[in-house]
């Protein structure tokens, strides 16, 4: 299994970084975690086919995590006719928003091949190659008026266990960190580095039994040096990926 970071910026695109987007590849099948980058362009530029996409999972509907899905869903429905996958997003009104944008362009926004679904409490994605369980998080709990729901993802594939915390709450307010992180061994944990200090992150991750911790979505001005200082301090490896970096698990 290979994880490629297609976008690693935090909130705003940077000179060499798109916004958050990660690509899981197993047995020629592609799964996207967030799509804040121009994902169709990147797939084309790296010689990958949209038809190989077998699932798209949005952690939340902030645009730095989802803006690339509009083009992906439009083209998968209307142009790449060999495509067959579902897009999963936290809430049904987001499905309607994506459909509305595609319809506004004059294209077909309904398809039997390519569907858009909201997570529900019982949802477990399992296509026999990759299993993914969404876990609700508290990313915007500092703003009670926010209508955004956010999710972490627990993933099993090729006998490996992965966790994507995705965006957490400000300073982990409300004890926001997926509890499953402390249950058993993880081959890879991917988290973010924008909503808390490096010291606060260390407190959360130091006791996780894992091989690799990847920190993406890093606030480069405030957190980069502190995160870099974590490298070599623990049994697990700490990596700070750039766009295009790959991790073989
Ligand atoms: Zn974000
Ligand atoms: Zn966010």
Image (cartoon, grey):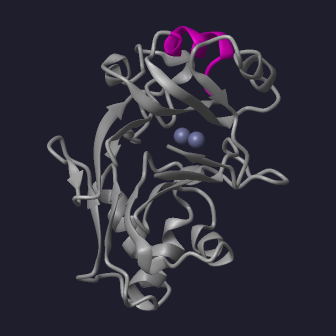
Q: Does 61 sit above or below residue 202?
A: below
Q: Does 240 sit above or below residue 235?
A: below
User: Is residue 107 in sight in this rendering?
Assistant: no
Q: Quadrant of ligand 1?
A: top right
Q: Is residue 48 left or right of residue 82?
A: right
Q: Is residue 166 left or right of residue 201?
A: left
Residue 116: say if magenta: no
Who's the residue at 49% across and 37% down the image? 166
Who's the residue at 27% across and 55% down the image? 118
Segment colored magenta:
195-206
Residue 165, position in %: x, y?
Answer: 45, 33
Who's the residue at 48% across and 77% down the image? 50
Q: Is residue 208 left or right of residue 191?
A: left
Q: Does 52 sit above or below residue 229?
A: below
Quadrant assignment, res 114: bottom left
Residue 163, position in %: x, y?
Answer: 41, 35
Q: Main secondary structure of the magenta part?
A: helix
Residue 48, position in %: x, y?
Answer: 56, 75
Residue 103, position in %: x, y?
Answer: 41, 83
- Foreground residue among 211 and 79: 211
């Amino acid at each position: 299994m290979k994880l490629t970071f297609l976008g690693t910026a935090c909130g705003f695109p940077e000179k060499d970084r798109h916004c958050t987007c990660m690509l899981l590849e197993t047995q020629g099948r592609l799964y996207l975690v967030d799509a804040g980058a121009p994902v169709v362009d990147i797939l084309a530029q790296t010689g990958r086919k949209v038809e190989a996409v077998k699932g798209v999972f949005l952690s939340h509907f902030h645009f730095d995590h989802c803006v690339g899905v509009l083009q992906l869903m439009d083209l998968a429905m209307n142009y790449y006719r060999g495509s067959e996958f579902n897009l999963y997003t936290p809430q049904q009104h987001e499905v309607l928003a994506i459909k509305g944008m595609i319809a506004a362009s004059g294209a077909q926004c309904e398809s039997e091949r390519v569907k858009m679904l909201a997570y529900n409490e019982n949802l477990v994605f399992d296509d026999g190659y990759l299993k993914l369980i969404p876990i609700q998080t508290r990313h915007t709990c500092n703003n009670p008026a926010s209508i955004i729901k956010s999710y972490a993802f627990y993933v099993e594939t090729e006998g490996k266990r992965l966790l994507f915390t995705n965006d957490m709450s400000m300073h982990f307010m409300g004890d926001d960190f997926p509890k499953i992180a402390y249950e058993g061994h993880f081959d890879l944990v991917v988290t973010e580095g924008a909503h808390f200090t490096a010291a606060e992150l260390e407190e959360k991750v130091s006791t996780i039994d894992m091989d690799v911790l990847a920190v993406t979505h890093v606030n480069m001005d405030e957190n980069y040096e502190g995160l870099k200082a974590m490298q070599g301090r623990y049994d697990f490896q700490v990596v700070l990926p750039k766009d295009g970096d790959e991790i073989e698990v």
